[in-house]
Amino acid sequence: MAEKGNQRSDEEMANSQPEQHQLKRKKRIRLGIYIAVFVVFQIIVITTLSLTVLKVKTPKVRLGAVNVQNLTAAPETPSFDMTFATQISIKNTNLGRYKFDASTVKFDYDGATVGQVNVPESKVGMWSTKKIDVTVSLSAKGLPNSKNSRLRSELSTGVLRLTSEATASGTVELMMVMKKKKSATMDCTLEVNLSTKKIQYLECE
């Protein structure tokens, strides 16, 4: 009887071993599926972030409202001198700060520079705008004689048209890990009303 009992026990163990192997195999398959789903999910998340939040956007440089402090214009000479206060704003829409080098904002008349102002190196926090107060002095004294005819005609109309441009070169730092160089540019057009001594038109791109 004991021998029969031992045989039965051996048979049960022999039968249970394939079942155990099958259970372990199912567990490994299930674990593999979980790992694969997790990896795919991570890839989707990283791809989505890289295309949206972590996508490095070019910061923007803009000229703010202009407050004319002093303005004299003489069509007969022709000449003009002008001093005004304004703000240079650097807007950063990235998930990380933007560190930019010192730059120069130029003001031109008909392609010739009539004044400029320096912007010191600085940084802008993520999703922030840095505004820098500046005072600008413009003068026609440095204009070449070839501009006299056009300037005389323009001053006689009572409206002085100017342009302004700037480039801020810097680096966007995302999550203190990824760095990417970005240059923000500005191209503005201004129209100065000589009678009211105010800016009647200002557009920046």
Image (cartoon, rainbow, N blue to C red):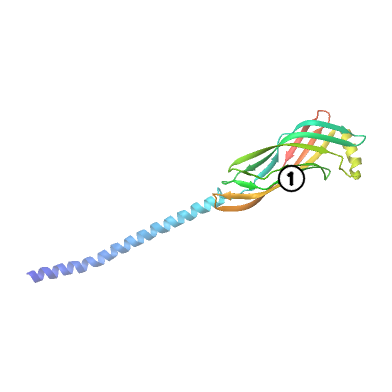
For residue 19, above or below residue 42:
below
**Coordinates of residue 113 in the picture (x, y in percent):** 82, 44
Q: Is residue 147 left or right of residue 167?
A: right
* Quarter of the picture holding the C terminus: top right
**Coordinates of residue 201 in the picture (x, y in percent):** 76, 35
For residue 123, above or below residue 80:
below
Q: Nearer the viewer, residue 8 or 156?
A: 156
**Coordinates of residue 77 in the picture (x, y in percent):** 92, 36
Taking the spot 42% from the left edge, 59% from the top edge, the residue there is: 36
Q: Residue furthest left?
A: 1
Q: Residue furthest top?
A: 196
Q: Which residue is mark 1?
A: 104
Instruction: Give the residue type at disc 1.
Output: Thr
Picture mark count: 1
Q: Residue furthest front?
A: 120
**Coordinates of residue 190 in the picture (x, y in percent):** 78, 38
Taking the spot 40% from the left edge, 58% from the top edge, the residue there is: 35
The answer to whether one can see residue 205 in this image is no
Q: How dense is the environment of label 1, judged by Cα within 10 Å: few (below 14), some, or many (20 and up)?
A: some
Q: Is residue 82 left or right of residue 94?
A: right
The answer to whether one can see residue 181 in this image is yes
* Quarter of the picture holding the N terminus: bottom left
Element at label 1: strand
Q: Is residue 107 left or right of residue 2?
A: right
